[in-house]
Image: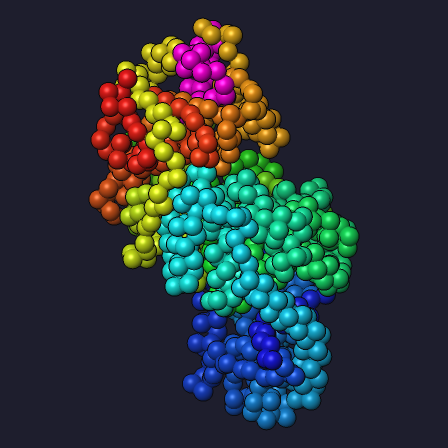
Amino acid sequence: MTLNVAVRTLCAFTARRGDLDRRFTPAPSAQEGMAGHALVTGRRGPDYQRELPLEGRHGELVVRGRADGFDPARRRLEEIKTHRGDLALMPDNQRALHWAQVKLYGALLCRERGHAELTLALVYLDIATQRETALEATFEAAELEAFFAEHCARFLAWARQEAAHRVARDAALEALGFPHAAFRPGQRELAEAAYKAAATGRALLLEAPTGIGKTLGTLFPALKALPRRELDRVFFLTAKTPGRRLALDALATLAGDRAETSALPLRVLELVARDKACEHPDKACHGEACPLARGFYDRLPAARAEAVARGRLDRAALREVALNHALCPYYLGQEMARWCDVVVGDYNYYFDAHAMLHALAREQEWRVAVLVDEAHNLVERGRGMYTAALDRSELLALKRHAPGALRRPMEALDRQWRALHAEDEQDAAYRVLDGPPTKWLGALQRLVQAIADHLAEASAAGTPMADPALLAFMLDALQLVRLSERFGAHSLFDCHERPGRRGTRLSRLCCRNVLPAAFLAERFAAAHATVLFSATLGPGAYYRDLLGLPADTPWQAVPSPFSAAQLTVRRSAHISTRYADRPASLTPIATLMAEQYRARPGNYLAFFSSHAYLEQVVERFREHHPEIPVWCQQRRMDEAARQTFLDRFVADGRGIGFAVLGGAFAEGVDLPGERLIGAFVATLGLPQVNPVTEQLRERLATLFGRGYDYAYLYPGVQKVVQAAGRVIRTPADRGVVHLIDDRFRRREVEQLLPAWWRLDPDGA
């Protein structure tokens, strides 16, 4: 049996010691790192060997990697690292990790070429100054060989365990059967399509109705494909917390409805946001401040062993393991992502600019199947991931209490900000610039560097915590700088201006993504297969264009298992919910809802385009129909409040829940049977007409010739169908949906509604 490991993975497993240290250090971006490597190697002579592939064996363990560069004349092997700021501030344990990497490469090179000794060098390039700092030492081949053997021996037991796990996992998945006696209607077709995508290594857009069992219907074929197509991992990505819960429940069902997945040798990990997993939010993430960071890497091996034995690592289980070993649950989860077969987490873990799962998959050369739940959300989420903004008011607030070293660069940035205001002769509240303003961006880059140096020095001096406002500004500015460097037709650079106190002009500058395809395409290309699924995922061209999927990505619709007889769809053609018509719509909407409730008492959901509109209708409804119970979605509800809202929908309940279209209760909510018997959708769902959306429409029209459809119509009707989909969840359900707006009778809108709906012909 041959076991393979990359040098980087081997070092990450065996060479890390001491504290977890997540204090801010000014790190270059991935693009800057690649450019820095190219710069350093470009300075070397003609005989310099770049990206040198090396390989060696220790027992059944084969270690592979690529050394950054080798100068044969000087017998000097280099490991190149990029950095920002004072190199002396780099933590010792990070430097030790770098030395371990170059020593392993040195041992492999001595073996391959028979060198008796080598000069090893860590070459650090400061991205800002382009200055190199080289730390070098000469080692005998025997010394490097002993180092290599020691680290391989420490890893080998784990590698054998991992290989045995892979064999057992694949055998179990080969034998795995569907956990129910039969598929739901339509679910088999969905599962077959998902399996075909995984088997052929391509992307798939899969539209399937709500209630069909999409989570289990995509996870099961993806798991079956793991052994048959030699895949390494499955990433199940969701937009919201309920989607994670559904995925974990489906995986438990596949394991036999047990609390643990030990019966099925499948390691499952739930990734949770840092702010929800942190045990000490008042402490900084380093050993001098947080007890769960102190000695983190020294205690990690025992925790890792317990975690893999546990198998099912949802939020509660991961926390239990972490606290058993006095470790941070969030960062233990980050570590366990390397060793779990299925990872369930938010979109950002694979798709955003700093996505951990994408980075791991590339580093480890994994073949991964990516399942994207409720994929219609990925367009807006993708835009958000690649949008960044700064407000002058934030800068002015920081200036008032700025440390001495930051006052000058802050003032320089503010001068450039004022100059931008002076250039606006029209005093426009909103304008789009030709691109990132060069002088302003240069001043921002210099301030970013100054803040980074200040924070790094403060960290090295033992300052307990950085000013949160300063750190937040720094991170937002850094994101804006990096996106500005990649500015193109996929984005806008705009300015919202408003008056401040005492005649001050304030503005918010934003590098706003319009077309996430420019960034997401590489993420799809890195996956072996991607299945994007939702109840509303059409038209296919819209998603292929905006997400950056290959032009030949198939779009498939699974026929609904539901019949028109189950759902009565009524369109209220006499009511307009346009902004100007809302005051006149309040009484007719309230009357319609009350009439439906009296005709069939039960639980209903009513959706509106905004909190303001919702509140107006609720007030009118309570005034005219006080006997009907109502409850409302509030602004900024936490998880407990959202659950309280949903708990009102009991099987024998009566009343109407008022909610915002596109919000927490408009999708991902399962209220089968008598828990929900109807819905009112009092809006076409179109995005608000404002300067930003109009710019979006114009840009999409230029790119694809479908500006209105892509910016307004498709996103709007999609939200309507999602909300209406809360009503019919099983073949036994019966319900009614009222579509309240005269525009629902338009042909272009009708064509976007589900084919199985039977629309009233007269709109009455």
Q: Identify the residue at horizontal 32%, vertical 35% (top origin).
A: 756
**Residue 443 on image: x %, y %:** 45, 49
Q: Residue drawn 69% across and 42% down?
A: 281
Residue 56's quadrant in the figure? bottom right
Q: Please check the rendered image and state whether residue 610 is part of the magenta-colored stretch, yes or no.
A: yes
- How would you classify the magenta stretch by its main secondary structure? helix
Residue at horizontal 40 percent and vertical 11 percent from the top: 595
The percent coordinates of residue 10 (x first, y second) are 63, 72
Judging depth in this view, the residue of 246 and 661 nearest the camera is 246
Instruction: Locate residue 185: give its quadrant.
Output: top left
Instruction: Measuring from the top left, give residue 528's x and y in whole percent.
Output: 43, 63
Residue 471 counted in the magenta span: no
Q: Which residues are magenta?
A: 594-623
Whether 279 is drawn above or below 518: the answer is above
Taking 140 as reference, is 453 left or right?
left
The answer to whether one can see residue 422 in this image is: no
User: How far across and down, in percent of the image, does residue 470 sit?
Assistant: 58, 43
| Name of the residue lying farthest toward the front | 181
Q: Nearer the viewer, residue 362 or 722?
A: 722
Left or right: 402 in relation to 582: right
